[in-house]
Image: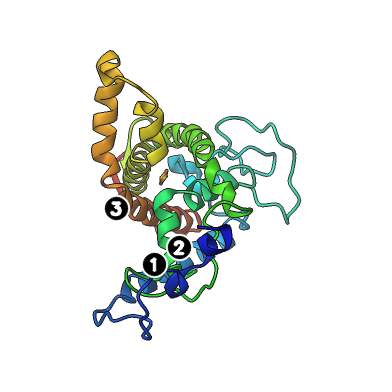
Amino acid sequence: MDGTARQRAGTDFPGRARVGARTLRTDRWWLQPLVTVAVLGIFIAYTGVRIFMRDYYWVDEYNYLTPLFSPCLSDSCVPGSAHLGTPLPELPFFIPLPFLIFPILAGFRATCYYYRKAYYRSFWLSPPACAVAEPHKAYSGETRFPLIVQNAHRYFFYAASLLLLINSYDVLLAFFPDTGFGFGLGSLLLLVNVTMLWGYSLSCHSCRHITGGRLKHFSKHPLRYKAWTILSKLNARHMQFAWISLVSVMLTDVYILAVSAGWISDLRIIG
Ligand code: FES
């Protein structure tokens, strides 16, 4: 097969049956891509606005720091919110406070094997569903720029894992405000969120490959085999972790925003 034929797509591909209709499916195949566009669209719009806000990401009284701004690293961070110090100077208003971490978080999700499937289908209709012809006439896969950047996923995984360790430390602090041990709904939301983020990261395809890939004999690496077996079980749930953690990040941020802005009070359970 020559290169031109290889790059032809959809119903034009040599050997494909000639079917005039775009699809013969009669079920609601469009529902899943539609829901994906709606949920991802809301998340992208929300975080796009949110990262440019300079307020309401930190609740000093209870040590709540939203995961979208963690770690806060500049002199522009509100007092108390910079757990790791402020190696960066004041940032001008047009640079978001999380300008270093947000590209990592966005890159980790954007290059994720599951999300790729989801947004290739829903945003690019490539194809929108099984047995539904795509509108594109050519196909080059992920062999050229910009999609070749998807191969950097494992590096985003390493960087995002470091941020996740910091997020876990944030949760610990949220259970130990200045008055000693205590927690409220915000602490619990942060805990659930970080648990879902761990689930998302540990179920990552790259994580599974790093753990058990490129081995010739599992029998010579029993610990890696055991870890790979556990991660493989999580990996089967990667799609669920992807969606739940996406929603949990947004809900946690909305809650901290609302408490920080004084719209609601934190529901204290202990302390
Ligand atoms: S494959 Fe989804 S986070 Fe790595």
Give the spatial CA distance, label 2 vs label 1: 7 Å
Residue at image mark 2: 119
Dot 2 falls on a residue whose secondary structure is: helix
Q: Identify which residue is drawn at 52% across, 73% down.
A: 136
- Secondary element under disc 3, as helix, strand or loop, is helix
Looking at the rendered image, the quarter that the C terminus falls into is top left
Residue 181: x %, y % from top left: 33, 31
Q: Secondary structure at mark 1?
A: helix
Distance between mark 3 and mark 1 Cα atoms = 13 Å
Viewer-closest of 244 and 49 = 244
Look at the numbered discs 3 and 2 and tell me whether their residues touch, using CB distance below 8 Å.
no
Compare marks 2 and 1 and give the one earlier in the sequence: 1
Left or right side of 203 for 233: left
From where the camera sits, is residue 267 visible?
A: no
Label 2 is placed on what type of residue? Answer: Tyr
The reply to whether the residue tagged 1 has its Cβ within 8 angstroms of ligand 1 is no
Q: Which residue is mark 1?
A: 36
The crowd level at tag 1 (other Cα within 10 Å; few <14, some 14-19, many 20+) is some
